[in-house]
Image (spheres, rainbow, N blue to C red):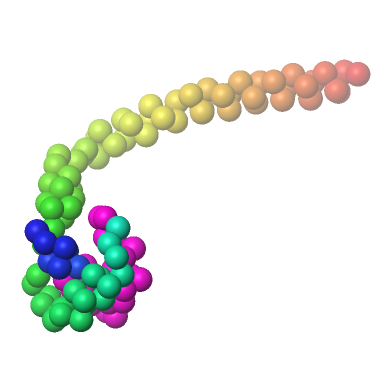
Amino acid sequence: MTISDEISIIANKLANEGKVPSVALIKSQLNQTLPLPQIIAALKNWHHDPTFIHTKHQDVATKASTEAKPNNTEISLLIANALAPLQQEITELKQQLKKLLDHQKNS
């Protein structure tokens, strides 16, 4: 893919999002640093084509989003495992608080 293609893809994505492609917006999304005149020249030659928005990065993102996702049971188990130490700590803190309050009553 050429630099002009990458700039066109970024400009198309921005336009599809309802944004006006600008040099600053495009520069912020480029994978590499380019001289401003090169970005400006490519942007001047750009014509909006809503279907021209495919990049290597989208392939990776699409692949990652279609990989196996945990089901509800797995998610519930992960949550329970994450909460268990917190629940134990809360129980211990409640016991310590009760001891402190009992100690204050007896003093």
Label total for image: 0
Q: Which residue is at 15% across, 55% downward?
A: 58
The relative height of residue 61 versus residue 24 in the rendered view (above or below) is above
Residue 43 versus residue 68: which sits nearer the camera? 43
Residue 25 is covered by the magenta coloring: yes
Furthest toward the right, the residue is 107
Residue 62 appears in the rendering: no
Residue 68 versus residue 89: which sits nearer the camera? 68
**Magenta range:** 8-32
Give the x, y percent position of residue 48: 14, 80
Give the x, y percent position of residue 103: 82, 18
Residue 30 is covered by the magenta coloring: yes
Quarter containing the N terminus:
bottom left
Residue 77 versus residue 2: which sits nearer the camera? 2
**For residue 50, what is the image quadrant?**
bottom left
Q: Which residue is at 41% across, 30% downward?
A: 82
**For residue 72, what is the image quadrant?**
top left
Q: Which residue is at 29% across, 80% downward?
A: 20
The relative height of residue 84 versus residue 65 in the rendered view (above or below) is above
Quarter containing the C terminus:
top right
| Left or right for 16, reference 28 | left
Give the x, y percent position of residue 31: 25, 55
